[in-house]
Image: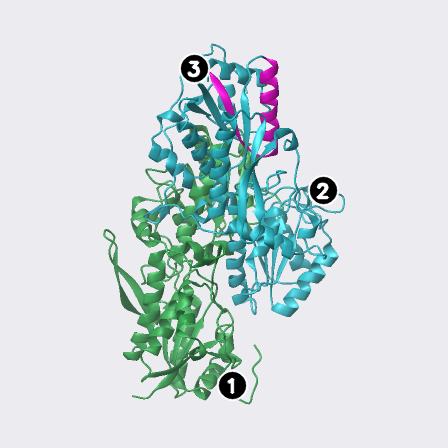
Chain colours: A green, B cyan
Amino acid sequence: MQKRNAFYAQSGGVTAVINATACAVIQTARKHKDRIGKVYAGRNGIIGALTEDLIDTSRESSAAIAALMHTQLASIDKNRAQYERLLEVFRAHDIGYFFYNGGNDSADTCLKVSQISARLGYPIVAVHVPKTVDNDLPVTDCCPGFASVAKYVAVSMREAAFDVASMAKTSTRIFVLEVMGRNAGWITAAVGLAEDETTPIPLVLLFPEIVFDEARFLALVDAKVKKYGYCCIGVSEGLKNADGALMAEAGSKDAFGHAQLGGVGPMIATLTKDRLGHKYHWAVADYLQRAARHLASKTDVEHAYAVGKAAVELALAGNNAVMPAIIRTSDKPYRWKIGVAPLDKIANVEKMLPRNYITADGFGITAKARAYLAPLIRGEDFPPFKDGMPQYVRLKNAAVPRKLASDFKI
Amino acid sequence: MQKRNAFYAQSGGVTAVINATACAVIQTARKHKDRIGKVYAGRNGIIGALTEDLIDTSRESSAAIAALMHTQLASIDKNRAQYERLLEVFRAHDIGYFFYNGGNDSADTCLKVSQISARLGYPIVAVHVPKTVDNDLPVTDCCPGFASVAKYVAVSMREAAFDVASMAKTSTRIFVLEVMGRNAGWITAAVGLAEDETTPIPLVLLFPEIVFDEARFLALVDAKVKKYGYCCIGVSEGLKNADGALMAEAGSKDAFGHAQLGGVGPMIATLTKDRLGHKYHWAVADYLQRAARHLASKTDVEHAYAVGKAAVELALAGNNAVMPAIIRTSDKPYRWKIGVAPLDKIANVEKMLPRNYITADGFGITAKARAYLAPLIRGEDFPPFKDGMPQYVRLKNAAVPRKLASDFKI
């Protein structure tokens, strides 16, 4: 069988475990040197392919590749690939395998590369490798990257709740944590793991799937403060009002008539202050939550590695336009395996939090959600620390000499 | 020598390691049962003493007290103690030792308790135990609680910088992290540890000690983005304008004419967008930074325990109105010991970041600052995890029966 090179790119934002997938792709490819020559990566993701700015991962040591397991890094997307150019570059560098690591958009790109390359007579084996903290890809039980964010927001809310509880009598009574997740409430649901039977916390969650109902929200917060002395609120950046508009983008004035500079977190905090009179604090963890490799879920790291390894093996076994998916076979004990999903079932489909994961009142998570989320955050995988700081690898990123005469404007 | 009870209270906000101090106070007192009877704590800190709502720590198991080592919790202050009432409660419960764990304000309270109790003929041995994430107490080389925040903000900025760097070519170019510290720039300086020779990061720091100069700030950010493709900014919540006003509180309009909802972090981010046109993200970690026991500095935990132990030993050795201080004897290798500071040298004095810890341009930290900060964040002391979540102890908080007839309004 013909030996060809592979191209690996990451799409969109960072996750804490994305480079466990990169590590798996490269290590697995190196085990099949009879079939896969070099693994190239694109500088700045797929843009590096368009501009023929390729990185030769074969110049990296085994130790450096292994160190990717505990390094978070990513690249770019959202720039509609110019497929013909991509294929021109692939052809010039004898690239026959395309591994694209991302979410919904990149699954679509990956599918199109497969289809167009076949039409143009230069068939590329295109395999999508799942990764998105939003956890909104269909078919797969979860998306690598999500579980570590879930762990981060659950731990952070638990820690902050201890802080607030200790001072609620005379100081802060409301704490608001704004979390990511776009239109899907998976990360918001994970905030619910902050509390359990042994660590009760008065918690109110605002999901993007549930239209914001100001009166009911305020009544619930008021009741919690009266009963427990304080209240912690987890709010999704994707929270929407009754018109379907994002609360955080409701013009220069927010939904409550305040002019807006911050996000929905400070907006919700201000609302509780204005209406209920309590002192508040709010946090917006933003990139901190998705880049927090220091608190990665071990389960997540294992998933991220497994999908990278499976992607290469699927490609070698003749699969095209597919994505390795994580298939859960049991909650207790948690068991999972790798399955295969055709890309036309993945591309551009968003998987929302099911309604039965949200309590009837719309402000909490159900036992079903807990059963889903609990195994995902299990296990720690601390990176190596030196002088108190985590050591994340920086690769050499050795450039591959160009072969094409033409430049390409992005 | 007469055996008397002790009262221990925590003042102000949480730190990641505050209960290592509580653990030390209780464990050390238990070793001296001939001299110290029970250690009482106040429900909600010193307020619990005023309202005679005391907690009997002798009802907690040794295991529970030991588990405080990895639990963050705190109590209250800022409510001017009603000293006579305090002494009335102390007398009713045969409390002869007062250990007050806090920052500047509580050092002052502690000093007054010592002075007034002597005047009223019921002398209390009052020892202040240092604790403040702001790190602004004089005499002591550092304040327990600070080093863990320092580690958290340095790690968080390093992780976020990897995120931004990977996407800067086509997406976010500016990342702003707002940090705590009030008027002192110690935490802001610690953000500077995110980068070092092996991990260069284009970083701009905005200290509360340096008046914000918009034009010079924008020019520097612009230069960094042009050279490195992105720029990370650490900004103190206490950043001030030329009038000495807090940027974050400059009325409902911020200093740039935007109406303000968020803090200074989003304000700075918006400014760079308006003037330089770059896409930005911002994070405000708020309580997450000071409650992050999961990422505590081991050095900090050791300091926190040492000052608690020393406080009890100082009291037993006849010292009054003092504070155990951390005295650094060497940077390399890092060595420290416990010294004693009289409270009148501590109360209400704020120690700012020295000017020679800040680079000449006002936007970075010097080698001197690094030499100071580096040893403090060293070492990890991860809490025990169960099912993916850190396990923080909740004590029984057994109430002590009241002895006084009168109530007391706070």
- Circle 2 residues within 10 Å: few <14, some 14–19, many ≥20: some
Q: CA distance from mark 3 to mark 2?
A: 46 Å
- Residue B28, magenta (yes or no): no
- Circle 1 residues within 10 Å: few <14, some 14–19, many ≥20: few
Mark 3, residue position: B402
Mark 2, residue position: B245
**Element type at mark 3:** loop
**Measured along the vertical axis of the image, is residue A129 above or below residue A335?**
below
**Measured along the vertical axis of the image, is residue B358 above or below residue B398?**
below
Q: Which mark is residue A401?
A: 1
Q: CA distance from mark 3 to mark 1?
A: 82 Å
Chain of the residue that carries numbered disc 3 in the rendered image: B
Chain of the residue that carries numbered disc 2 in the rendered image: B
**Measured along the vertical axis of the image, is residue A409 above or below residue A245?**
below
Q: Nearer the viewer, residue B282 or B18?
A: B18
- Circle 3 residues within 10 Å: few <14, some 14–19, many ≥20: some
Q: Is residue B236 visible?
A: yes
* Rendered residue at 41%/72% (across/down): A100
Magenta segment: B94-120
* Rendered residue at 33%/52% (across/down): A378
**Measured along the vertical axis of the image, is residue B361 above or below residue A73?**
above
Quarter residue B277 falls in: bottom right
* Rendered residue at 58%/21% (across/down): B113
Residue B262's spot in the image, x, y percent? 60, 46
